[in-house]
Amino acid sequence: MGSYPFLDGCIGVTLESGPSMVPIFSNTEIAFRAKSNAALRRSYWLFKAVEYPWLVRMGSALGRLALQLRLPVQWIIKETLFAQFCGGESIDDCKATVDGLAEYGIGTILDYSVEGLDTEASFDATLQELLRTVEAAGKSAAMPFAVFKMTGIARFALMEKLQQDLLLTDSERAEWQTSLARLDAICSRAHALQVRVFVDAEESWIQAPVDSAVALMMERYNRESPVVYNTLQMYRTDRLSFLSAQVARAKANGYWYGAKIVRGAYMEKERERAKLLSVTSPIYPNKMATDEAYDAAIRLCCENLETVAFCAGTHNEVSCQKLIQWMQLHGIAATDKRLYFAQLLGMSDHISYNLANASHNVAKYVPYGPVRAVFPYLVRRAQENTSIQGQSSRELALIRQEWQRRTRQ
Ligand SMILES: Cc1cc2nc3c(=O)[nH]c(=O)nc-3n(C[C@H](O)[C@H](O)[C@H](O)COP(=O)(O)OP(=O)(O)OC[C@H]3O[C@@H](n4cnc5c(N)ncnc54)[C@H](O)[C@@H]3O)c2cc1C
């Protein structure tokens, strides 16, 4: 039995390890080594502010209104939420962030975070920007992945209709073919440049056509190496069997299965919709069940590394520790490119920087886009830090610890 009893039986293994095997996420000197005192102070006040749900609600509503009325509030947003959670307004703008992360062995995943566009012209424009992110990653070892959402290049309502097996009109069929061509353009470019690309997961009621389209891309482009990765939200009760079937299919057909394993970001929305439609919620009833499914998915990936390459997209320390433990027990090198960890910029630096310090493959999503366009993303980050239990208080405790360490010196 190891010194980490809470990890015993983790993802199905018995632990025999000692403390030195696990990077210590509480090392704040490493966690905040890239932050000046001023940047640390700014992060402190930001996480302090988002602890108050009423403040987040009021700030979001006022910010949205001010942006709609074109009031000069962009600089306030840029100095606060944007500075914490975004890399810049354009790819070039993100250079300092990319270099800063690379200095400490952390990769960047450029995330073009413009949302809510729903016209063919906007999808075409988004495609061009996404291709630029793939090109940028192709030129830089500091960018191991690109990422995008299907709703950035295809119409939400169309995918909803596809999922419901409703008959499409001729023009809708043509529209879906155009969307698939956009998807193929990104994946084929990624394949040519050997850039790995994540397709984010979204609401369950559009996910089926996304899954099918991404599986097709994997069959096409993951023959020699893993290029295309789908995302699996383990809060969904059907995802473990889905993952298992997809891995078996990849194995039988001789291609790599690329997976980003996350818990899932749309829990409240999913539950509300299920209630509204009087159907069973697709989400596990409690956090423990989601955690168990998350562990099981990671175990499944780990046990099939001859077919699977995956990324644990999580801010959960225990999930990261369990995976590291498994790698160590099975002699998988920290630098093995089949396994990656990923976090979001501005969150859980203690995980990212300590993982990188222990030579693990780790990357951060670096969202970017015009302030006005990324505002919904910023609001979600603020809400997440308010609503996810202990998230902002954990960040605050770590910052305080680091502050004390610095002032003691
Ligand atoms: C790099 C990266 C990429 C991501 N990509 C995506 C993506 O493509 N699609 C997507 O949907 N999300 C994505 N996310 C967000 C992710 O799904 C989680 O919402 C977020 O990371 C919090 O989960 P956690 O594992 O970090 O931490 P935790 O704090 O351990 O887990 C919180 C999560 O647990 C689940 N949960 C909480 N309470 C309950 C409950 N009562 N019942 C059931 N489940 C519960 C929810 O999923 C919640 O978000 C991504 C996150 C990261 C870091």
Image (tube, rainbow, N blue to C red):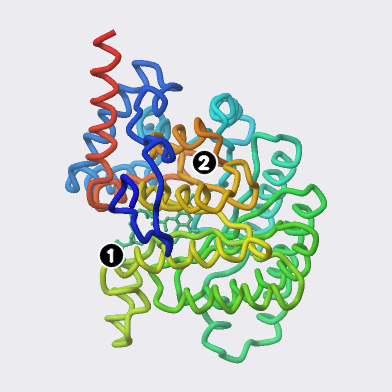
Relative image position of residue 9 (x, y in whole percent): 36, 61
Tag count in the figure?
Answer: 2
Q: CA distance from mark 2 to mark 1?
A: 24 Å
Residue 381 — which label?
A: none
| Rendered-image quarter of ligand 1 | bottom left
Give the amino acid type for the residue marked by disc 2 in the picture: Lys
Name the residue beneath numbered marker 2: 364
Badge 2: residue crowd in 10 Å (few <14, some 14–19, many ≥20): many
Give the amino acid type for the residue marked by disc 1 in the picture: Lys
Disc 2 C-beta below 8 A from ligand 1: yes
163, above or below 179, in the image:
below
Q: Secondary structure at mark 1?
A: helix
Label whose residue precedes the other's in the sequence (2 or 1): 1
Horizontal side of 160 relative to 33 (left or right) equals right
Disc 1 C-beta below 8 A from ligand 1: yes
Horizontal side of 377 relative to 218 (left or right) equals left
Q: Nearer the viewer, mark 2 or mark 1?
A: 1
Relative image position of residue 252 (x, y in whole percent): 72, 78
Splitting the image into 4 quarters, where does residue 277 fall?
bottom left
Viewer-closest of 170 and 112: 112
Splitting the image into 4 quarters, where does residue 42 fall?
top left
Name the residue beneath numbered marker 1: 287
Name the residue at the top extreme: 409
Q: Quadrant of the C terminus?
A: top left
Residue at figure coordinates x 43%, y 51% from the top left? 314
Viewer-closest of 295 and 116: 295
Residue at figure coordinates x 32%, y 29% from the top left? 43
Residue at figure coordinates x 56%, y 65% from the top left? 303
Residue at figure coordinates x 74%, y 68% from the top left? 255
